[in-house]
Amino acid sequence: MLTSAQLVTIDQVRQALSLVEDPEIHRPLTELDMVGAITIEPGGAIGVQILLTVAACPLRERITSDIRAAILAIEGTTTVTIEFGVMTDEQRTALRKKVSGDEPSIPFAQPGSSTRVYCVVSGKGGVGKSSVTVNLAAALAARNLRVGILDADIHGHSIPAMLGLRAGPTQVDRMLMPPSAHGIKVISMGMFVDNNEPVVWRGPMLHRALRQFLTDVFWGDLDVLLVDLPPGTGDIAISLAQMLPTAELLVVTTPQHTAAQIAERAGAVAAQTKQHVVGVIENMSWYDAPDGTRRTPFGAGGGTLVSQRLSDRLSADCPLLGRIPFDPEFSAASDHGSPIVLSAPKSPAATVFHDIARALTPAPRGLVGVRLTVTPR
Ligand code: ADP
């Protein structure tokens, strides 16, 4: 009769490990050269050595449970012992090249990229641009889309706090693995400055930082990338338009006509950069008073005005995508690190965000030209 030790082979263990993906890179551990020695003891005790990219890998527990489950599924296995090691610099460089190639490039600017990039812009600060970005991201993620946010509001970065994100990126060679919150991958200048220090960089340095966020961050396969731009029509908007020529603009305004005029200017940059304005979002539009009347403390009509004027200027339809009510819960939600779409999912504001997310959801990807990973059984 065969003993269990004779039943399990190294090939079987490797095969099982080829079904376990690195949770950040989404490629099999075997393909990423993360599997070291494999031992098989009499009685079916399996030992594997796993090389992590960094010692303090935040996903160590997840990798452990995935490996255990995969190996225990092999008939004849009794126990699994995992010994973790750390890659050498050379191994990390090899992994980075395997994942992102030799030359740094911007994945979203490649001809085959199917990621929709929306740059969220406003004329002036305080109109709710960052609040709109995080809530829209949460509403898009709720539609099972893979969503990332690049906080390019380098002087006024607030996205990590709004999402309750305290972790920074993990570095593998020169590749940065972005942390996630609520299923949204995030990179922000706020993650690279200590103690909320002000960022005093000027044009060329900002350009370089942004480029690095686009080339060196491992975003993976995203459906949508939202870029939160600083208010106005400055250097960063122009730099981004050069780096991401297919990015579309989303203009945020309040109903106030003076705010709308400034927002129109931010949107009109699209005429120079040849970008498409996908639509306008009006924020802080109204609230329902306890007596049942609808109040408009910030005036009315700003969103419609920006939509009409931009449509005329750009000779293209720039629709008003939605009017988000004023809701004190916004500040409370962002103070608690949770967008209102998640903390008050049935609120009128959340409903508008879901409607906008539906309008901005990319068409399902076809399978033509997509490499299918088929695992032989
Ligand atoms: P910006 O990015 O345009 O500077 P923020 O998103 O930081 O603006 O918003 C500014 C302030 O307004 C924040 O305190 C935010 O919580 C609040 N806010 C944004 N939108 C709303 C809203 N619809 N109702 C109530 N408060 C809001």
Image (cartoon, rainbow, N blue to C red):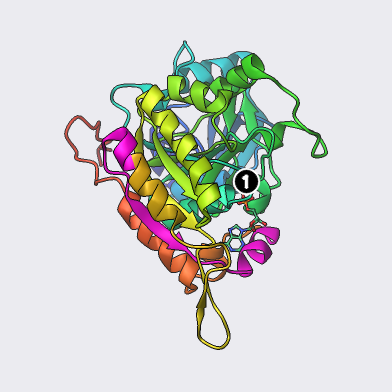
Is 318 within the magenta? yes
Residue sitting nearer the eye, 312 or 188: 312
User: Could you tell whether 338 is left or right of 31 in the image?
Assistant: right
Vertical placement of 53 versus 325: above or below?
above
Where residue 67 sits: x, y (%)? 51, 45
Amino acid bearing label 1 = Ile
Is 281 within the magenta? no
Residue sitting nearer the eye, 250 or 366: 250
In this figure, which residue is indicated by the disc labeled 1?
159
Residue sitting nearer the eye, 51 or 183: 183
Q: Give the quarter of the figure containing the C terminus.
A: top left
Q: Name which quarter of the figure residue 151 lies in.
A: top right
Mark 1 close to ligand 1, CB under 8 Å:
no
Q: Residue at x 44, y 16 (%)?
A: 101
On the question of residue 136 being in view, the answer is yes
Q: Residue at x 54, y 48 (%)?
A: 258
Which of the four quarters of the rendered structure image does ligand 1 lie in? bottom right
Q: Name which quarter of the figure residue 249 lies in.
A: top left
Disc 1 packing (10 Å; few <14; some 14–19; many ≥20): many
Residue sitting nearer the eye, 146 or 66: 146
User: Could you tell whether 258 is left or right of 319 in the image?
Assistant: right
The residues colored magenta run 311-336
Where residue 91 sits: x, y (%)? 58, 17
